[in-house]
Amino acid sequence: MRLAGGGVRQEVTPAGGLAVKADVFHVGLSSDAHEDLPEAQATATRARTLIEWQSDWAPSKSMRIRPRVETGGRWDGGSDVRGFGTEVGGGVALVHVGLNLEVAGGARYLLAHQAEGFEEWGANMALRAGSGVTGSGPWVSLEPEWGAAASRLQTLSGPQADLGLSPGAAVTGIDGVQPGRLRLAAGYALPEADADLKLEVAQENRGPDAGPTLGVQLSATLGW
């Protein structure tokens, strides 16, 4: 299995909250024939370009509200889903500065796609606490998720097979295909270096006929 991905975000008008985001990933999977499984080869690729608007509003000294909306296009290629699409998303985060607490929620939806019958959506919530929420220091979070991840990189690195590597799965619609996930994460924020280190443990409910699975992931977010 080979996997590569990355993304960039560039502010266009910092005062107005506009930015351009782009991300891309590629994954390839090959397997030799076994007693119960035939030889298999599959690839999946996605590239997205989005325009994002976000704001930071402080109705009081202790409360901050951070709304966000984004829309743009994407291209999917690989063994299953191919073609261009348009998606829209957004969310809002409420931050209590005095308590170092953040409550956030977001969603995204695929408006249209060249692949007939291809449906996709994703939703998430997060409860995060710790000094790293508003400044430097550690933080912990509880993050339930449903549907598809925006870049699918989290899905690819976890125990669940990616839709693009399962012929016919992606075009059946998202319902019943991608289960919910519960992430428990801990990290350390370094705002002076524009960096955030994160270790997360994810429990994934794969459906009524299969028990939950666990995965561990270490990641870092850096800015320059």
Image: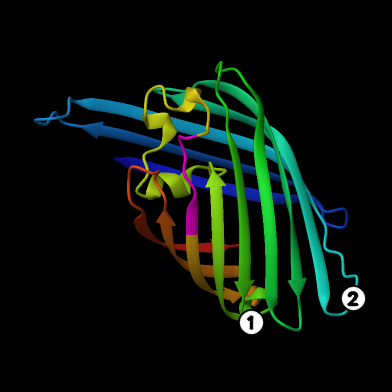
User: Crowding at label 2, few (<14), some or many (≥20) Cα neighbours within 10 Å?
Assistant: few
The image shows residue 125 at horizontal and vertical percentages of: 63, 57
> Label 2 sits on what residue type?
Ser
- Dominant secondary structure, magenta: loop
* Residue 194 visible here: no
Q: Which residue is mark 1?
A: 131
Q: Which mark is residue 121?
A: none
Instruction: Find the magenta span and give its range.
Output: 176-182
Q: Is residue 47 above or below residue 59?
A: above
Q: Which residue is mark 2?
A: 60
Residue 120 position in % (x across, y down): 58, 33
Q: Earlier in the sequence, mark 2 or mark 1?
A: 2
At a point 56% along the width and 69% down the height, the residue shown is: 141
Q: Residues within 10 Å of mark 1 (few under 14, many from 20)?
A: some
Q: Is 177 one of the magenta-colored residues?
A: yes
Image quadrant where one finds the N terminus = top left
Tell me, yes or no, whether the highlighted magenta stretch contains residue 207: no
Give the number of the mark in front: 2 or 1.
Answer: 2
Location of residue 121 in the rendering, given as x and y in whole percent from the top left corner: 60, 37
Q: Say which element carries label 1.
A: helix
Relative horizontal placement of residue 73, taking residue 82 as reference (left or right) = right
Q: Of 13 and 150, which appears nearest the observer?
A: 150
* Left or right: 44, with 56 as reference point: left
Residue 148, compared with residue 191, is above or below; it is above
